[in-house]
Image (tube, rainbow, N blue to C red):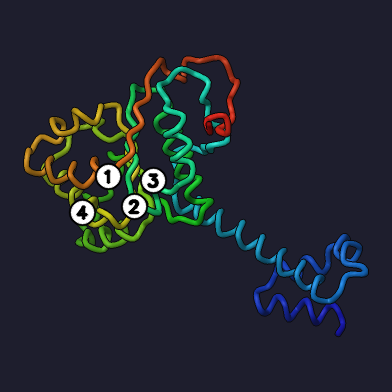
């Protein structure tokens, strides 16, 4: 078969990466002398790799992470109270398979959001569906959904997401409707999906922050006891001038 018709057929089948590989100058050089099955395998591998890359880009775009953070660039050399064994366990993402939560607390600027987004990016790379929200923005979206009579649809959509990141929890007061919405979200996800929360407020103070004792009990019951806790400490990283960054691999004992 002539090359051009073959390329057109591959493109018609949406095997565009295989078609592109056929026309690449290095393709014939690398494939010279290989059996047909091996040459075909190279083309298929090229297609699969390209689709995996595109799928990751789609995951990251949909996640809308607050920071372009990665575990490889995580600074673990500063004294911020990081439990390295716990950090190593979190990087395996086993907690996602077990539908557990992660609660990251600490003062402003110590890297809570960065760590949360780094774990979320790792989840995207592992082909999990992820969504990131700053809690004040989530409240705005829920209010809008309520006005437009589509809150139930919004809740159902959130319930399907493998990992939801709630950044800046307890930063602003919650109205009663906000507390009930939060309970609805967490109840849908309990033992089914994972939630990652970052907050300046220690977990021990969340009950007081939530206000209503009954709702606070219900929310924390679905959030805290089945979670890993990371309590960061130290000065704000934003004040640091040292750009040196340590590899996450150093956290693994």
The answer to which of marks 3 and 1 sits earlier in the sequence is 3
Residue to which mark 3 is pinned: 132
Task: Check disc 1: other Cα within 10 Å, few if <14, some if 14-19, many if 20+.
Answer: some
Q: Are marks 4 and 1 in contact (CB under 8 Å)?
A: no
At mark 4, the secondary structure is helix
Taking 41 as reference, is 160 above or below it? Answer: above
Q: Nearer the viewer, mark 3 or mark 2?
A: 2
Q: Are marks 1 and 2 in contact (CB under 8 Å)?
A: yes
Position of residue 241 measured from the top left corner of the image (x, y, whole percent) = 55, 14
The answer to which of marks 4 and 1 sits earlier in the sequence is 4
Q: Residue at x 42, y 18 (%)?
A: 236
At mark 1, the secondary structure is loop
Position of residue 53 measured from the top left corner of the image (x, y, whole percent) = 61, 56
How far apart marks 3 and 1 lie (CA) works out to: 20 Å
The answer to which of marks 3 and 4 sits earlier in the sequence is 3
Position of residue 229 measured from the top left corner of the image (x, y, whole percent) = 32, 34
At mark 3, the secondary structure is strand
The answer to which of marks 4 and 2 sits earlier in the sequence is 2
Q: Are marks 3 and 2 in contact (CB under 8 Å)?
A: no
The answer to which of marks 1 and 2 sits earlier in the sequence is 2
- Name the foreground residue: 178 vs 49: 49
Residue to which mark 1 is pinned: 226
How far apart marks 1 and 2 lie (CA) works out to: 9 Å
Residue to which mark 2 is pinned: 99
Q: Nearer the viewer, mark 4 or mark 1?
A: 1
Residue to which mark 4 is pinned: 187
């Amino acid at each position: 078969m002539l090359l051009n018709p073959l390329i057109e057929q591959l493109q018609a089948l949406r095997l565009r990466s295989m078609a592109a590989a056929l026309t690449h100058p290095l393709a014939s050089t690398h494939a010279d002398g290989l059996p047909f099955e091996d040459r075909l395998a190279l083309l298929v591998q090229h297609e699969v790799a390209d689709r995996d890359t595109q799928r990751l880009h789609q995951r990251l775009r949909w996640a809308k992470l607050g920071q372009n953070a990665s575990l490889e660039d995580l600074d673990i050399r500063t004294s911020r109270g990081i439990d390295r064994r716990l950090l190593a366990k979190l990087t395996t993402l086993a907690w996602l398979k077990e539908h557990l939560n992660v609660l990251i607390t600490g003062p402003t600027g110590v890297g809570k959001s960065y760590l949360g987004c780094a774990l979320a990016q790792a989840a995207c790379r592992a082909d999990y569906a992820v969504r990131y929200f700053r809690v004040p923005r989530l409240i705005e979206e829920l209010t809008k959904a309520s006005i437009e009579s589509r809150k139930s649809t919004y809740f159902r959509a959130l319930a399907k997401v493998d990992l939801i990141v709630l950044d800046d929890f307890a930063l602003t007061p919650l109205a009663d409707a906000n507390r009930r919405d939060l309970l609805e979200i967490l109840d849908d996800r309990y033992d089914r999906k994972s939630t990652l929360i970052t907050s300046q407020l220690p977990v021990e103070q969340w009950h007081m922050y939530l206000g209503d004792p009954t709702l606070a009990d219900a929310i924390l019951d679905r959030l805290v006891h089945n979670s890993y806790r990371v309590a960061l400490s130290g000065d704000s990283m934003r004040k640091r001038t040292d750009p040196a960054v340590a590899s996450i691999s150093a956290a693994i004992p």
